[in-house]
Amino acid sequence: TTGKEYAIAAMTNSTAFVDVSDPLAPIYLGRIDTQGTSTSFWRDVKIYQNHAFIVSEAGGHGMQVFSLAQLATVSSPPVTFAETAFYGTFGNCHNIVINEDSGFAYGVGSNTASGGLHVIDISNPTSPVIAGLFGTEGYTHDAQVVNYIGPDADYVGAEIAFACNENDIAIVDVSDKTDMQTISNATYPSAFYTHQGWLTEDHRYFIANDELDEINGTGNTRSCLLYTSPSPRDLSTS
């Protein structure tokens, strides 16, 4: 509503909010402190419907929900904000993934579901509710979840998770949160730690990278290109 641009910085002990509308004169508006008392180098933030959703690997942190509308009301910065809502069904959590088209958040690398997908209904951002757990493929380090529009007719319109699971990429149909199903697992030569990835805009390719390949004898760091047609069940790697 203000047209201002904000930077949200995940800190070791808090989440900081900075007005960067004037890049030559940024204004530190304030922060929301971490849940609990411990700090962590791992904290992640995603945005949905004008709310920030914050997770951390700090023990017992859960998910903080913060209404960004508060940023427009700060008159004497910096201030210490209070969280707007809290979700405590998991404790520590490495990353949070949000599919803005479906209104679901996915905690990954938490202390639940073997570190897999912990699905939360955030259609009402201040009243998050658990929707399902998927731990069949083990620990998920990072993911992208989309309503699939790619070339595979079998899955067009389905909600699909592309999960980077350390030693492979797990493609999971998460449309039914009570019965999520693995579609495919894909790997690549000399996989050391499948770290993260992202789909092209047309969902035809998923581009992943490895955190440890260049320090384990592969030379330069590489990207892995996965083709999602004719079927995610038959992914090819290049």
Image (tube, grey):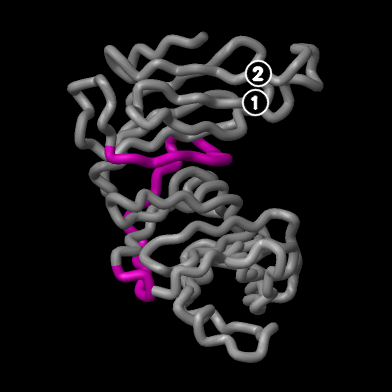
Calculate the distance from the C-alpha at mark 1 to the C-alpha at mark 2.
7 Å
Res. 222 mark: 2
Q: Are marks 1 and 2 in contact (CB under 8 Å)?
A: yes
Report if residue 67 lies within the magenta region. no
Position of residue 10 in the picture relative to residue 228 (left or right): right
When asked about the image quadrant of residue 172, the answer is top left
Would you place residue 97 above or below residue 184 in this image?
A: below
Q: Secondary structure at mark 1?
A: strand
Report x, y in % for residue 139. 55, 39
Q: Secondary structure at mark 2?
A: loop
When asked about the image quadrant of residue 154, the answer is top left
Report x, y in % for residue 135. 45, 41
Report x, y in % for residue 2. 44, 74
Would you place residue 54 above or below residue 154 in this image?
A: below
Report x, y in % for residue 14. 69, 70
Report if residue 132 lies within the magenta region. yes
- Disc 2: CA contacts within 10 A as few (<14), some (14-19) or many (>=20): some
Would you place residue 53 above or below residue 213 in this image?
A: below
Residue appearing at x 39%, y 14% in the figure:
235
- The image quadrant where one finds the N terminus is bottom left
The kind of residue tagged 1 is Asp
- Disc 1: CA contacts within 10 A as few (<14), some (14-19) or many (>=20): many
Q: Which residues are magenta?
A: 124-147
Q: How many marks?
A: 2
Relative depth, front residue between 54 and 29: 29
Residue bearing mark 1 = 210
